[in-house]
Image (spheres, rainbow, N blue to C red):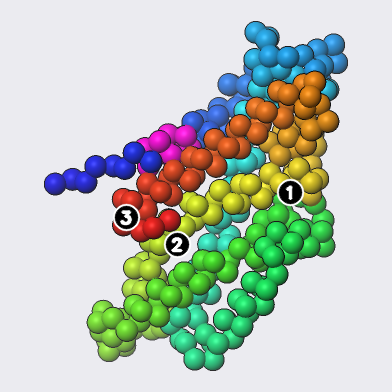
Amino acid sequence: MTRAVPQPLLVGGGLLLFFLVLAVGAPVIAPYDPIYQDVAARLTGPSAAHPFGTDNFGRDILSRVIWSARIDLQIAVLGVVFPFVIGTTAGTIAGYFGGLTDTLFMRLVDIILAFPFLVLMLAIIAILGPGLASFYIAMALVGWVSYARLIRAQILVLRQSDFAMAAKSLGFSHVRIMFRHLLPNAMIGSIVFSMSDAVLVLLNGAAISYLGLGVQPPTAEWGIMVADGQAFISSAWWIATFPGLAIVLLAFGFSLLADGLGEKLGVRA
């Protein structure tokens, strides 16, 4: 009997599909150029011409929210992919070989965990300079630890399994055993965790842009838009509200997707 698809998986997947459509179809869907300034229409409230209103430069908020989906989806995906690849590789090697390799690995993990995540990330970005490239590098250097610990714990168990012992007895290389036999059986938990981690990455990306260390103006990005609207929150609430809602909805979509995948695969996210 086929197991029903969990409702959180359907809703979360639907939200992510919605934002993906916005991102891909932004040139067609957005009614205005996201950086076009109409000074005569500055700080105009929601109306038929501008459903989400305009900002202090007369730029259409709806168009900027739509175009921002491209940047923020990219942040959520690439900000997870790089730590995932690095952490998975490091955790697999440490868990498989054990001994001194595993000891050195755990000491490196302890050093990284000794620093607050956001503080360490901000320090790296401050050294490298503002921009998305610096953000991705910072996420890769700091965020890989969680994936590495998850994979290592699984590999430590799986390397003692019968199929791993059989692969060794057949003379297979260490690389083949690690990445063709052990890793595919150890990745389910990390894949589910990556969906939850995408929420943290998205919020970190928006926070970095809010602080002026991420995406740089005039590029449309939700964190920048929230920062731009902070000074007008009492008189032009729409500037910060709509991009803020977009961040919440996209994060909610990733969170539901993680819950749904965990339920479907029998893993706690």
Q: Report if the CB atoms under discs 2 and 1 are less than 8 Å apart.
A: no
Of label 2 and label 1, which has the lower sequence position?
2
Q: Is residue 267 magenta?
A: no
Q: Which residues are magenta?
A: 9-17
| Crowd band around label 2 with a 10 angstrom C-alpha radius: few (<14), some (14–19), many (20+) | many
Q: Nearer the viewer, residue 172 or 99?
A: 99
Residue 261 visible in image: yes
Is the residue 128 above or below the residue 176 in the image?
A: above
Disc number placed over residue 208 in the picture, else none: 1
| Crowd band around label 1 with a 10 angstrom C-alpha radius: few (<14), some (14–19), many (20+) | many
Q: Which residue is mark 2?
A: 190
What residue sits 77% from the left and 36% below the top? 227
What is the residue that sits farthest to the front in this orientation?
234
Q: Residue 123, image x and y in percent?
A: 78, 62
Disc number placed over residue 265 in the picture, else none: 3
The amino acid marked with disc number 1 is: Ile
The amino acid marked with disc number 3 is: Leu
Residue 138 visible in image: no
